Amino acid sequence: MSSLRRESQDEEEYWMKSRVNKSKFNLFDDNVTVENAEELAKSKKLLTQFEDDDVDTVNWDDTPVSSETESSANSGHVVPPSASSLPKSASRPESRNVPPYMTHSRSQSESFGVTGRVSFTPSSLESVTPTVQYSKSQEKLHSLTSPSSARSLEDEIPSYISTSSGSKNLEEEILYLRRALKKARELKFSPEDTIRKMILGEPYSLEVFRSKEEKLQLLDKAIQVHDGNAITAVILFLRQTIKPSLFNLELQRRPVAINHYLSYLRTHYDFKELGDVLGMLNRTEEAAILKYKQAISAPDVRGKMNALRGCLKAHFIHEPDLAHEANLVEQHAALLERQWPIEDTDSKSEAQGNPLFKQFPRKVSILNMPLITTLYYCCFYHGRDAENLLTSPFAIKKQHQLSDKQYVWTALSARSRLKQWTGIEELLTAKGWFGSTKKVSVIGFDKVCEILHRTSAPEEILSKYLRMIDGSERRLNIARKYKCHEVVVETLVYLRDRQELQVYASKLPPGSLGLRNAQDALRSSTIKWKT
């Protein structure tokens, strides 16, 4: 009896001295970090092999494994345990989920030494209950569940950590979003509440309106409240969620929505879509003007000419209501085609040292200039050119159908600046009956005098055309305005206003020609003055 007690004490003393009790380490404890697990995996002691002697094979519930299971484990195959050998928690179908790569419960975790070795069951063998070899002599653990070579702890721990933290959190977030989306879809949002939130600046969602009828009701409610931002937002939502043909059809039925949509396209410079919508709405004039604006926005002259010709053929020629506009576009294209060679020739002539360009240098290029500016340029630098030349002013007048007043005013301004007084006289001379000539001005001689005075014409030239102004009172006022004293004295004598002539003569400088003429008229006895 004493010998048995002595053996029992020796056995307890042996197990109390075991290395398992000296340094215990729980892999599944909450304080264990990934770094500690990796250090445990890289330890050289984990790579040692189990000794065949003194090895007990046990399950997770500390029940011994039969010889058949042990032989199967040694041969590399796993024998699933019987239902009787499994713990109650494992035999229940509603047992809690376990992380992949592990079939382990915190209540069943074993404490083992630093020299222990653990392998985990792959996810493909979730139905297999792992068995553990425990060596009393070496206190080492290893798994017998892998059908092939066991995976090391270094390979398994990162996978488990990423799966249990990142993937689990991601799955929970996805589930939460799915539940929130399902709940949002179940809620009934009325168009009135949504439009009210849009106007008040509160958060809203248009995605809850799924059917075509709900979307059109939303658009109608936005039109009823006359809020442009809400109308535009709903229109853009419709454009993204319904067919283009149906979208265009519903827009045609709502003029207010069409106007807001067109304004949105203009603001965002979506000219292609804007042109298509205008064409669909049969607004040919607006579509043609839009294409014309796009054509004239070309950066270079040659590209602008080609764009204008294409726009003219596509949008203006075939529309009877745009016949007048088509003529204007034709003239614009023709003007550019005339300016191009003139600019090329004059730039070369200026580089060669033409005296006229030296005396009056060109300030800007003639390209893209208006028609009247081009006419003035040609009257100034090419006033004597023949009609068959592109630079001829008269050819420009004829091709672009300029009026006589436009031509005379522009040509008179150019020749007056050049001091071509003879050319001005030729411009204002017209043929009369039987080969006679007379001075005629379609703009009026008062305008002629205005141009001459602006260009500092000599007094004798200015007085010459002042005398051609009809109406004594009008001629008198214009002569006083331009200080042509000789014409003022002549007009006062013509009006026989002695008192006014005396007052005016008193204001003239001594020795001037106007004063001498006024004094001669006052001393004359042949003039019958008004009383």
Image (spheres, helix red, strand yellow):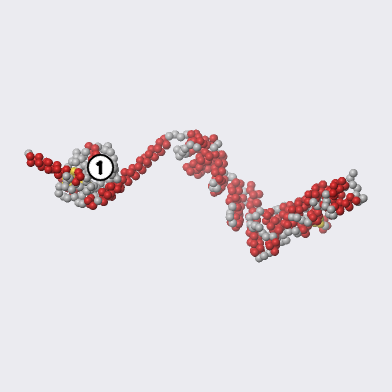
Q: Is residue 79 left or right of residue 369?
A: left
- Identified at 31% across, 45% down, the residue is 161
Q: Nearer the viewer, residue 157 or 91?
A: 157
Q: Which amino acid does the dot numbered 1 rest on?
A: His
Q: Identify the image quadrant of the N terminus.
A: top left
- Identified at 60% across, 46% down, the residue is 286
In the orientation shown, which residue stands out farthest toward the bottom?
352
Examine the rendering and report whether any part of residue 279 can be seen: yes
**Which percent across, then down, holds residue 323?**
65, 49
Q: Is residue 373 left or right of residue 465?
A: left
Q: Is residue 7 left or right of residue 28?
A: left
Examine the rendering and report whether any part of residue 78 can be seen: no
**Which percent across, then down, holds residue 479?**
80, 50
Snapshot quadrant of residue 5:
top left
**What is the secondary structure assignment of the residue under circle 1?**
loop
In the orientation shown, which residue stands out farthest toward the front?
510
**Which percent across, then down, holds residue 174?**
37, 41
Q: Nearer the viewer, residue 450 or 34?
A: 34
Q: Nearer the viewer, residue 476 or 371?
A: 476
Few, some or many residues within 10 Å of mark 1 (<14, 14–19, 20+) = some
Residue for badge 1: 104
- Identified at 27% across, 47% down, the residue is 37
**Which percent across, then down, holds residue 438?**
81, 55
Q: Identify the image quadrant of the C terminus.
A: top right
Q: Is residue 42 left or right of residue 202?
A: left
